[in-house]
Amino acid sequence: MKLKRIFLSLSFFLILSGMRPLVHVFARDPKPALDAYTLIAEVNALRAVNGLAPYTINATLMSVAQAHSDYQASIGTVTHYSADGSRPFQRALAAGYPVGGTLSLGGFYSENIQAGTNLSPQEAVQIWQEDAPHLNTMLSSHLMEVGAGVTNVDGYLYYTLDAAQPSGGIVPNYTPDPNETPNGSGALPTLDWIMPVITSTPDEGGKVIHEVQVGQSLWGIADIYGTTVQEIRALNNMSVDDLVYPGELLYIRSVETQIPVTPSLAATEIVSPTPVYLTETRVPTREPTLILTETPAEMKTEKIASGGSLWIVFAIIFIALILAGLVTWLSGRERD
């Protein structure tokens, strides 16, 4: 019995030992970090390179940013406005965050948004470095706290980064004045929209020139035109520190222009023009009119010819009668 128990125990141990390697065989590699905290880590790393203190993560701002990423994913586009038309700092106030600064000017609050297929946090931060407003959001010396949100829809990711400075713990009551026009002169400007990149057609010389619109970045422009940021910078003599601004013209590439071929004329048969016969349409009148029919020229000639022959016959007969009368008269005189 003891030997049987020992055998069973050894067998069970060997079975368990043999199953352990299966765990390692089927273990999956961890997915690349696409979460909001990785995005914040990338921003703080950029701040460190530029000699700035890292942003402090705020739970309320995390909730606000994540909610806005979810909203953008639900409508399939990037926008700084919510469904009710509220702006970034207004969403933070509604969530209970004490936004500092002059609220009529947008407060000390700034938001970056970006979306793209398989877009990593590192790529999102790189894109934001290509224009001044987005770069200032990440490198502000006035803002202190940050929140981020990431929403993944079948590989298409929506990123939101909200940076702010609190007012001291008290959430101010703010009622927007419908007559005021915020000029974005708070801590940092916030882009209220991002214009999609629309490819330009080549000019007469074959050059493709793109005019930068609001919110567009070198990365987004290069992606739509099927080129790279490095190529665009090289063609436009831009350094890695140069930013793009709305209204700026970027030389994208040159394309070959085809010279139009003049089609050759094929030989055609010359056809003489067909004579046109004009007919006159007369308007009927109240009085009857004599209808004249024109006799063809050939028929007139025949009639004239036949008429002349009859006259000749009559003349011959008449002359013959005269001659016969003269002969008879002369014969009568000779008898006398």
Image (cartoon, rainbow, N blue to C red):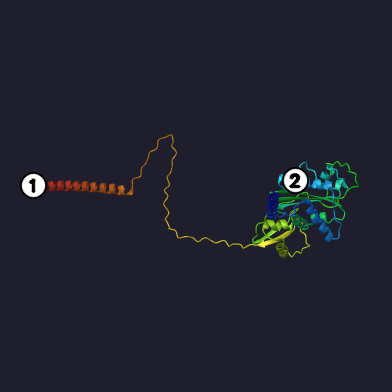
User: Where in the figure is residue 250, as x and y percent of width and height?
Assistant: 72, 60
- What residue sits 67% from the left and 62% below the top? 253
Bin the neighbour count of mark 2 within 10 Å (Cα to Cα): few under 14, some 14-19, many 20 and up.
Answer: some
Tell me the amino acid under the disc marked 2. Answer: Asp
On the picture, is 290 further left or further right than 97?
Answer: left
User: What number is the disc on residue 27?
Assistant: none
Secondary structure beneath disc 1?
A: helix
Whether the residues at callouts 1 and 2 have beta carbons within 8 Å, the answer is: no
Q: Which residue is mark 1?
A: 335
Tell me the amino acid under the disc marked 1. Answer: Arg
User: Where in the figure is residue 40, as x and y percent of width and height?
Assistant: 80, 53
The residue closer to the viewer here, 234 or 205, is 234
Q: Residue placed farthest to the front in the image?
A: 1
Q: How far separated are the C-alphas under marks 1 and 2?
A: 158 Å
On the picture, is 171 further left or further right than 161?
Answer: right
On the picture, is 259 further left or further right than 268?
Answer: right
Residue 331, relative to residue 219: is it above or below?
Answer: above
Viewer-nearest of discs 1 and 2: 2
Q: Which residue is mark 2?
A: 70
User: Where in the figure is residue 317, as x and y percent of width and height?
Assistant: 19, 46
Secondary structure beneath disc 2?
A: helix
The residue closer to the viewer here, 19 or 193, is 19
Bin the neighbour count of mark 1 within 10 Å (Cα to Cα): few under 14, some 14-19, many 20 and up.
Answer: few
Mark 1 and mark 2 lie on one chain; the one further toward the N terminus is 2
